[in-house]
Amino acid sequence: MRFGTFYFFQAAPGLTHAEVIHRELEQMEWTEELGFDQIWLTEHHFIDYGLSVDPASLAATAAARTRRVRIGLAAAILPFHHPLRLAEQMALIDIISKGRLDVGVGRGNRPAEFRGYHVPQQENRERFDEAVDIILKAWTQERFAHAGRFFTIGEARVIPKPWQRPHPPIYQVCGSDDGIESSAARGWPMLNSLLTGPVDQLVKRRDSYLTALRKHGRTEGEIAGLMKDWGVSRQIYVAPTDAQALAEAKDAEMWYQDSLRRFIIPDRIEDAHPSLQPGFRAMAERFSQVVVRPALAEPRGEPRLRALFERWLRWPQAFRQPGGCIFVAAASELDDRPGPTRDCLVRLQREWLGVIATTVRGGQELGQLRADLDPQQLAHELYGIMLVHHHSSRLLRDPASGARTRAAFERLLADARNPS
């Protein structure tokens, strides 16, 4: 196992952008001095989640400031680059570093970045595939030509060639089953991140990768070599005790989680191409699996209503969702912005309120809840309690928010019970 450091150049409050950049460049030097094995760099645009707007410049700087550690990109977002230019830059950096470069590539996943570069996000897979083809030709052929959907290149001679032959190691960021399949088909190591959620998700991706490698005819020796280069990123903070580590890292981690939420949820979700909107439906399916279906398995009436509440309360933690409940966060973005994504969100929320109201009616039929109770009104009030919880726990960081929310629910339920 090898250990490295990963640099986003995140613009947290209290530091100027220049201070962020120079501090992290200094930390790259510490990476080598302290005995780490690798420096990893990423690429992001138009957000304080990461000022790493030019991975080539950062990699060249890291190469000039170090002598031993490997320097990896995780990743260069190919749809934002002309592949000839990127091939030249990477070859030059490989020479400057004397063969210490690892080139991770990715398709990109943030609508605002694609919109900023006027690149349709729904084309990212095809653009990625074509760019990879051109880069490999540029590195390995003396002269070549290319005619594709996005790039037409007459006879070109790309020099210098990389230090490492035939080219630097290539990794692929694999955030989906499709990415895992693509990486396995090409025989590249995969890069995964564990920014949120349980470690089990890594095991699932590893197993999917192994299955795909064997499907594509890789030998066990080849598979062992690829797994040796499997890259995983996650946050680590070290202190004498877990309690101290949590206390010292909490504010920074909460800022990061909120920044990640703003990175994941586009500024205007409804501007995304319709082909990208199924993500909301996937999240709705997760909500159904974690909250609705298990609760509906409980006995009708009050037990089922209580199960709905408890599972709803724990829903953001069930998948370690950055920024809390994605539906609440999205509602604040879309409440006054007509469009297909808002329409989808409205439908999902109305269905959820209907589930609550139906559960209340079941309690009335069993005589547990008052016959004169308005089921829609109780659903409305319960929804309000959960909105306050989101505000209290996320914005105010109130450690007692969960207890206060449960107390509010118990009062609401007590008032709804049939006195007889």
Image (cartoon, grey):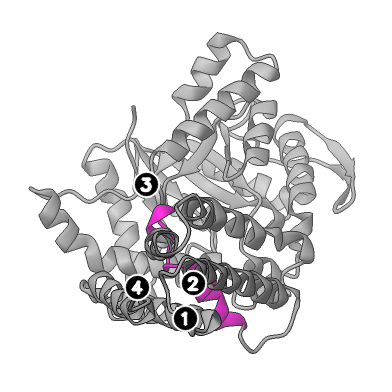
Q: Nearer the viewer, mark 2 or mark 1?
A: 2
State the residue lying farthest toward the bottom: 336
Name the side, left or right, on which 79 lies relative to 259.
right
In the image, 37: left or right of 195?
A: left
Report x, y in % for residue 401: 26, 74
Residue that badge 2 annotates: 364
Magenta: main secondary structure: helix
In the rendered structure, the answer to whether residue 387 lies left or right of residue 214 reads left
Mark 4, Cα crowd under 10 Å, few <14 / some 14-19 / many 20+, is some
Residue to which mark 1 is pinned: 378
Q: Amino acid at mark 3?
A: Arg
Quadrant of residue 283 in the image?
bottom right
- Identify the residue shown where x is 37% and y is 57%: 317
Q: What's the CA distance linking mark 4 and mark 2?
A: 51 Å
Q: Is residue 160 visible?
A: no
Tell me if label 3 and label 1 are in contact, CB under 8 Å: no
Q: What residue did someone put label 3 on? A: 234
Q: Nearer the viewer, mark 4 or mark 1?
A: 1
Task: Tell me where residue 329 appears, x and y as whole percent.
Answer: 50, 75
- Considering only order in the chain, which callout, 1 or 4, is on the residue closer to the N terminus? 4
Q: Which residue is mark 4?
A: 12
Q: How many marks?
A: 4
Residue 119 vertical placement versus 328 (above, below): above
Distance in Å between CA atoms under marks 4 and 1: 41 Å
Q: Secondary structure at mark 4?
A: loop
